[in-house]
Amino acid sequence: MTKFSSFSLFFLIAGACMTPECFNMEIIGGSEVSPHSRPFMASIQYGGNHICGGILIHPQWVLTAAHCRARFAKGKSPKVVLGAHSLSKNEASKQTFDIKKFIPFSRFKPDLELNDIMLVKLHMAAKLDKNVQLIRLRSKDYIRSGTKCQVTGWGTNDPEFYRPSDTLQEVTVTVISRKLCNSQRYYNHKPIITKDMLCAGDARGQKDSCQGDSGGPLVCKGVLFAIVSGGHKCGNAKKPGIYTLLTKKYQDWIKSKLAPSHTN
Ligand code: 4AZ
């Protein structure tokens, strides 16, 4: 299942999928975070359904993956929910926003999984409080392989059907070097893992991000390093998760889009 397939196609295939691999489509080894302990987490929703994660980097801007946009059809308007822990509960901490605009990275190439990063502008600024907070962007391009990082999201933990987790989950994954990730043992250059991407997984394939976690954060040593982009299925040791690494190129792009001259 590639991340670019349409929402309905996913249902169709997921429903028919009865192979052992399909039973691994979950955040294995993850656990529920304590409510509101990740106040920068956004849920991007469509027709009330969680589609992708997002990261609050400014009161009016959320960072996510560019491929998330392809998951919206015409008609209903997508929304961003901040301050959530449970997606289904009517939590007083929740703030819901319409979207003013999407700015996918100009050279986003879905077929090559390149530049999978997008800014989402909320129709108005969020009210920052203890449940809704910004994550600070710090520029660090390099991360040593073997580093343990946390990936957080409402992505699926249902092995048979696409169904997001109701509560926010987190799992620790390990950074795999680009060279190794491109090698035959792993992705074998399909797709090419570029300098703007990062691979992270688990030696036994028991910890991973999955559908619905896209657009969410990979935090290493307390610093936001990357965004969940995708990978081949979920929970396969030889196909670790692929992340968009927040290199200087993307940080400069974010700064330029958030500059006052762009805020209309
Ligand atoms: C997805 O489709 C997706 N195992 C997210 C993460 C991973 C695979 C797919 C990584 O959103």
Image (spheres, rainbow, N blue to C red):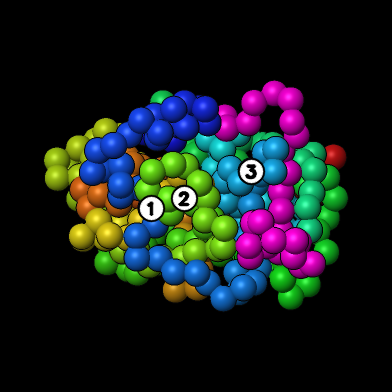
Amino acid bearing label 3: Asn
* Residue 28: percent from left, percent from top: 34, 60
Q: Going 47% across and 32% down the picture, which residue do you hit? A: 11
Residue under pointer 3:
49
Q: Which mark is residue 156?
A: 2
Mark 3 crowd level (few <14, some 14–19, many ≥20, 10 Å Cα): some
Q: Going 63% across and 31% down the picture, which residue do you hit? A: 72
Amino acid bearing label 1: Glu
Q: CA distance from mark 3 to mark 1?
A: 18 Å
Residue under pointer 1:
26
Say which element carries label 1.
Answer: loop
Mark 2 crowd level (few <14, some 14–19, many ≥20, 10 Å Cα): many
Ligand 1 within 8 Å, label 2 CB: no
Left or right of 114? Residue 93 is right
Q: Nearer the viewer, residue 222 or 249?
A: 222
Q: Nearer the viewer, residue 162 or 39?
A: 162
Say which element carries label 2.
Answer: loop
**58 vs 117: above or below:** below
Q: Earlier in the sequence, mark 2 or mark 3?
A: 3
Q: CA distance from mark 2 to mark 3?
A: 12 Å
Magenta-tinted stretch: 70-94
